[in-house]
Each structure stands twice: as structure tokens, then as C-alpha cells.
Amino acid sequence: MAETAAPNSPAAPEKTAPAGASVAKKPSKRKKKPRQLAYVNEACTGCAGSPVCQSYCPVEECMVLVQNPSAPTFGVIEVDPFKCIGCKKCTAKGPEGTLLDGCPWDAIVMLDIDEYEAKYGELPY
């Protein structure tokens, strides 16, 4: 019997390296904690379903658009603290060709890792 992907989770395409390139295995644990983590506050509107911060984040599946629990017809961004590398790209760029500098709603703030862990608990890195 062939395996199928779980509902609502399409199978990810296989990533292959060019011929002759070596492929390093992704480490299961981080080498060190980031100094800062992105935190999305209650001002997030999900940019009407097209959040720009997601496209500028270099880490796949770090910033995820989810249903807003207090307004189910809208979405909000959630940041995976285990994937965030603290690069600030989500706060430093706006959509191409605009004068925006980061999130137009100031919904993304960078928290020092110590402040984040004091508020939400220690992260097991």
C-alpha cells in the first residue's frame, strides 16, 4: 500500500544537490542560542492573507500564517522560536517598491533571548 501525505499537509518536494556537490546533514540541535527572537504581537493582521514577513524570512516554516483565535476570519503570524535565527529580516524590509521599513503595523518585535525565556519559559537548545 502506498503512503499518502496527511490531509492539509502536501508532500514537500525533494531537494537535491547539484551533481558533484556534497550534502551536509542538518544538525538535530542548534549549536548556540540566537541573541534575539522575533515575536509577533497582537497588532498582527496577517496582511490580509499575504504576509510579507514570511517571504523575507530565510528559514522555511519559521513564520506561519494561522487563524486568529480572537477573529477567526483573519490570520496572524506565529513565529517558531526553535527555527527563528534572529536575523531581523522580517522587521527590516517592506514589500518591493514600497517605502515601508518592515511590518506596516509594527507587529514584529525582536526580543532578547533572556527576555523571551523569562516571559515564555526556557527553550531547550
Image: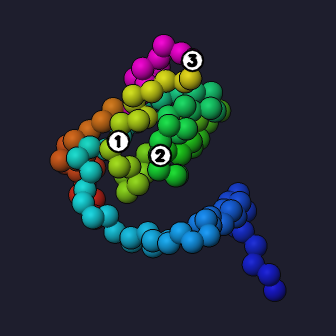
Rendered image quadrant of residue 30: bottom left
Dominant SS type (magenta) = loop
- What secondary structure is found at the residue carrying circle 1? loop
Q: For the magenta stretch, what is the residue range?
A: 97-108
On the image, numbered disc 3 is attached to which residue?
97
Q: Are marks 2 and 1 in contact (CB under 8 Å)?
A: yes
Q: Is residue 59 above or below residue 112?
A: below
Q: Residue at x 27, y 64 (%)?
A: 31
Q: Residue at x 53, y 45 (%)?
A: 64
Residue 45 in the figure: left or right of residue 113: right
Q: Is residue 49 above or below residue 114?
A: above
Quadrant, the N terminus:
bottom right
Q: CA distance from mark 3 to mark 1?
A: 22 Å
Q: Work out whether 113 lies above or below 17.
A: above
| Label 3 element class | loop
Whether residue 12 is in magenta: the answer is: no
Residue 47 visible in the snapshot: yes
The residue beneath circle 1 is 87
Q: Which residue is mark 2?
A: 58
Q: Nearer the viewer, residue 40 or 33?
A: 33
Sequence-first tag of 3 and 1: 1
Q: Is residue 94 above or below residue 123?
A: above
Q: Amino acid at mark 1?
A: Cys
Kind of residue sitting beneath label 2: Pro
Secondary structure under badge 2? loop
| N-term mark: 2 or 1 | 2
Q: In front: 51, or 72?
A: 51
Quadrant in the picture for residue 95: top right
Q: Residues within 10 Å of mark 1 (few under 14, many from 20)?
A: some
Quarter of the image holding residue 124?
bottom left
